[in-house]
Image (cartoon, grey):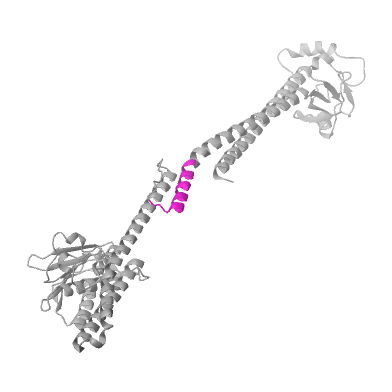
Amino acid sequence: MSLRWRIAAGLALIALLVGVVAALGSYLSTSDQLQASVDESLLARANDVNRVPGPGSRDHDNDQRTTGTTGQSGPVCPLPGIFQPAAAAQIVSQNGKVKQCIGGGPTLPVDRTDRTIANNGGKPRYRTVTIDGDDFRVLTIRWHEGGALQIGRGLEESNSVLSSLQLRLALIALAGIGVAAVLGWWIARRIVRPVERLRETAERVARTQDLTVEVPVTSRDEVGSLAHSLRTMMDALATSRAQQQQLITDASHELRTPLTSLRTNLDVLQRVAQLPEADRRAVLESLALEVNELTNLVTELVELATDQTRDDEEPEPVHLGELADAVVQRARRRTGRDVAVVITSNGTVLARRHMVERAISNLVDNALKYSAGEQPVEVVVDGHRLEVRDRGPGIALADQPHVFDRFYRATEARTAPGSGLGLAIVKQIIDRHDGHVWATGRPDGGAAVGFDLPSTADGNGDAVHA
């Protein structure tokens, strides 16, 4: 069953339940009122017949008794007309004898409770009995001459009213259910239509792979929020696809140069017998260099494309100064270059240790690559900020916003070795830690490239040189 039908069926079911409860309540209330009206009429008629004592009623009682049936044994019945609209009336003596007061009327049943009222009196008793298939409402009350008076009134009129009321209530309930179902269907169409448009949009995107399809946002309710989330997701997917396509384009361009060089050197090696020893060694060294560059490029490209920097390592509080010192020690042993660590304030950050070490290592390698052999490189740690400074050619103002882009190279660095992905990986790592990267030129020559991370604690201390 579709959502539209479920909503319509749910509203119809609610209408059914409300209709049944309302009809039942109306029926029971009407039935109680009709029964109370019959009981009141029976009691009023019984009190009139029974000569209820009241102001000036004794003389009237004497007059009324003389008009009753006399000369007979047992209790004396009033005239039959006085019992109207009752259809049956009888007097039950204390010894249990029954004397009918309305000729041709039905005989009312007498049980132990009725005989108790005849002998001992008590509260009037009402009950409903069935005689020859007809329902009667019967009142049993103490008779003033002893015994009990029973008056019965037929319930044909009340039953007819209730039967008619049942039919009307059933018709009203059915009409209410029908109206609720129609309204539910109409409301469901209005509710479900935005969802159907979202479904159609999703199916169109799946069929055409077009992430630029406009997602309809027609309201600010939950459906509108869902549409907005879907639009945001598609925008993110479109951006990711564009970045992947750009990465493929840039990678193919970067791979073309080392592959061309490899092909050229292999062509030269085909004439190896004709080459002098020095040329053969130069060609082999060039091949080794190109293979190494190609290996580094592919490794970093795969890492960047598959997002392998996001591993299962949990963030932990670390000191940037300790990470910087470990990276610098390895760089000194590997290159033999002069790299210094300056800690002006040792701050604690919440980070993935190995990822941040990789970022620092890339910054140090980048600085060493662009610095002259004798020029020192400094790693400055100030709380949750880290900056690597070199004495190289620096970064032109126009290049500074782009140095963290994939495969970007400044004009002065076109011939420098490297994949062009080192700083892009740094930015990716720092972005994953909600940090910030920058690259600027130094006033006295060289470049300053660094990052900062959200600080969890501030460490204070004197500057330390390592």
User: Residue 268, image x and y in percent?
Assistant: 25, 81
Report which quarter residue 364 is drawn in: bottom left
436 or 104, nearer to the observer: 436
436 or 370, nearer to the observer: 370
Residue under the point 83% across and 24% down: 146
User: Residue 162, image x and y in percent?
Assistant: 72, 27
Res 357 visible: no
Q: Which residues are magenta?
A: 193-211
The prevailing secondary structure element of the residues shown in magenta is helix
Residue under the point 55% across and 42% down: 4
Q: Is 256 on the left or on the right of 367, as rendered?
A: right
User: Residue 220, image x and y in percent?
Assistant: 40, 42
Q: Is residue 47 magenta?
A: no
**Quarter of the image with the C terminus in it:** bottom left
Report which quarter residue 104 is drawn in: top right
381 or 250, nearer to the observer: 250
